Amino acid sequence: MTRHFKVIVVGAGSMGMAAGYYLARQGVKTLLIDAFDPPHDQGSHYGETRIIRHAYGEGREYVPLALRAQELWDELEKKSHLKIFTQSGAMGFGPKGNAPFIDEAIASGREHNLEVDYLSGAEMKERFPGLNVPDDYNAFYEPNSGFLYSENNIQAYRELAEFHGAEMSVNNPVVDIEAFDDSVKVITEKETFTADKLIISGGAWNKKIAAKLDLDLPLVPSRQPVAWFEANEKLFNSNTFPTFMVEVPTGDTRAIYYGFPTFGGCGVKVGRHEYVDAIDPDTMNREFGSDENDEGHIREFLDTFMPEASGKLKKGVICIYTRTPDGHFIIDKHPEHSHISIAAGFAGHGYKFASVVGEILSQLAVSGETEHDISLFKIDRPSLKEASVNK
Ligand SMILES: Cc1cc2nc3c(=O)[nH]c(=O)nc-3n(C[C@H](O)[C@H](O)[C@H](O)COP(=O)(O)OP(=O)(O)OC[C@H]3O[C@@H](n4cnc5c(N)ncnc54)[C@H](O)[C@@H]3O)c2cc1C
């Protein structure tokens, strides 16, 4: 017999698992389905940690969501036995007059009266002696931000969702979805389920999943290397050094490098935040080092800006960003089926919002609306159809 749920979540990763928790906590009969066994190394949450910052270079509209997300992470920390967040602080810097991302982060901090120190490169070097920054760079430091343990946090939401009665169906890819006026049928490799409401949060697979509901979403998954390096533990540990976002001019464009301090001897973790060619998540080369730039770009950055963190490569992994043409997320209802919500296109900056996105998705599923302003993330906005801007 086909089992029926109030809500089915397709894709129990960063966003979906949080949604499952906020639904189950309200007593909503919820099923979470995943192709793997989350957290796992195929998802966009892979690689242990994610930065959370409140001053926001991708647009000041994100600040209220970042602050609510932080509240929810702090709440999760109290409820879980797992480590959720480390308040290492967060900083950013870039060349004055040629770093729009850093400028916007600074403007967002001022507009929202965030606790942020606005500094020059010279002041930054004095505060963090491991840094090698030109004196006239623009910089900011926020003491209340830091990093999240992405894999732990999914595990924490999973445990709490199950505690509140949510069911999990793992290692069970969804292969088809049928939408009716007031219900859905979800066909997986192992079983078929039905539900009143559906949430689609399939990360890098969202384009393929949405296509089953006749939606052609402009989502582009891309391959993203990230690596850990031996570093001077005194200068770069999470008690003395914050997470960082650094905007570096490269020819006629800019690259953003991001990273994390070392803790427990893991090394300094660094990645290059950029959008490269589209990949298929089912066939992408997941071997770190198969492209010489996997380490090369990051090594160049460390040698220039943090030479004492440019030690031996300890580990490298490959992960996936999924971006939209305008760089903003999609969080909305299906244009023709209001009982189906979609959360997609979280690119390289979505994890920090997973807690609040889970809250939003649970509200959309229960009442059809949310208390949060998600107008930036509409599925039918014109800028989703425009040419890519490298956000
Ligand atoms: C290297 C890297 C660094 C990043 N750094 C940061 C950072 O510092 N700060 C930040 O905020 N964000 C960061 N991000 C972005 C953030 O991690 C992602 O935006 C976020 O994890 C996306 O969440 P998601 O729920 O969309 O995807 P996922 O977490 O991947 O979840 C999607 C789930 O859907 C499942 N699924 C797929 N297809 C199916 C199917 N057919 N049936 C059932 N289940 C299916 C998958 O198995 C997966 O578990 C980074 C991303 C990467 C790759």
Image (cartoon, grey):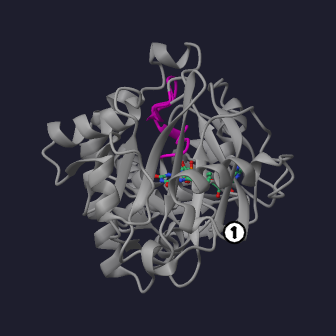
Q: Which residues are magenta?
A: 327-349
Reply yes or no: does residue 330 show up in magenta. yes
Give the vertical position of 37 relative to 106 (above or below).
below
Q: Nearer the viewer, residue 227 or 355?
A: 227
At a point 82% along the width and 56% down the height, the residue shown is 289
Task: Name the residue beneath numbered marker 1.
Answer: 37
Horizontal arrangement in the rendering, residue 201 relative to residue 187 (left or right): left
Which quadrant, please, contains the N terminus? bottom right
Figure quadrant of residue 299: bottom right
Q: Residue at x 24, y 48 (%)?
A: 119
Q: Secondary structure at mark 1?
A: loop
Can residue 10 be seen in the rendering of this structure? Answer: no
Q: Percent x, y for residue 334? A: 51, 30
* Main secondary structure of the magenta stretch: loop
Q: Which amino acid type is shown beneath numbered disc 1?
A: Asp
In the image, taking residue 366 as reference, residue 178 lies left or right, namely: right
Residue for point 62% across, 68% down? 39
Q: Nearer the viewer, residue 87 or 46?
A: 87
